Image (cartoon, helix red, strand yellow):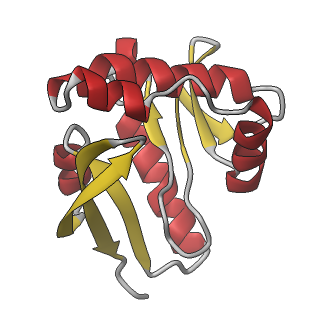
Amino acid sequence: MITIRQFQCGEEAVLRKLMFDTIRSVTIKHYSDNQVKAWAHSDIADESWQDRLRSNQPLVAVLKGKIVGFADIQANGLIDHFFCHAEHQGQGIGKALMLALLEHSRTTNITRLFSHVSKTAKPFFERFGFDVIKEQQVNVRGEVLTNYLMEKVMPTR
């Protein structure tokens, strides 16, 4: 059973590795090797990564005692990070995280969710009712990557 819980200080390195490994192994289907290496670079300063996670307060997915995914939603509706472990794709982890984010948005009255979504994640976000607002070309460490600004307007009560 998948458990969704709040991030805990001390998990920063595990989440960074999960993100890095997922980008390097899953998104390679839609991006070149150079693009993937620019996106999942190894020169993030530990302190800045720790500060970002502590600020974003992601939700963490745990399966059989192992962290298998994480996602966050900001007060303005931005989903900044959304990653499922490369070895656990298609097992309901992303769905559990997305449902938790949607529930959070309902309880906090966030009326619009949005994210900068990779080619790889675009179909997943579409299944949850996100629409493409625009295709974007983003420069990441000298490599141009295509992603999509996607949004979901939440129903009002």
Q: Position of residue 147 (x, y in %)?
A: 24, 52
Of 139 and 126, nearer the camera is 139
Q: Horizontal placement of 108 versus 100: left or right?
A: right
Q: Position of residue 63 (x, y in %)?
A: 54, 18
Q: Horizontal placement of 75 versus 6: left or right?
A: left
Quadrant location, the C terminus:
bottom left
At x 45% / y 17%, what residue is drawn?
A: 21
At x 75% / y 55%, what residue is drawn?
A: 55
Residue farthest to the bottom? 157
Would you identify the image quadrant in which residue 116 lies? bottom left
Using the image, determine if residue 41 lies above or below residue 123: above
At x 70% / y 38%, what residue is drawn?
A: 49
Using the image, determine if residue 74 lies above or below residue 22: below
Q: Position of residue 123 (x, y in %)?
A: 16, 46
> Could you tell me if residue 93 is visible in this image?
no
Residue farthest to the front? 142
Q: Horizontal placement of 129 versus 87: left or right?
A: left
Would you identify the image quadrant in which residue 90 lies? top left
Using the image, determine if residue 157 lies above or below residue 94: below
At x 19% / y 43%, what residue is drawn?
A: 119
Q: Position of residue 155 (x, y in %)?
A: 35, 81
Of 73 and 6, nearer the camera is 73
> Could you tell me if residue 103 is visible in this image?
yes
Would you identify the image quadrant in which residue 60 lies? top right
- How many numbered discs? 0
Q: Horizontal placement of 25 versus 97: left or right?
A: left
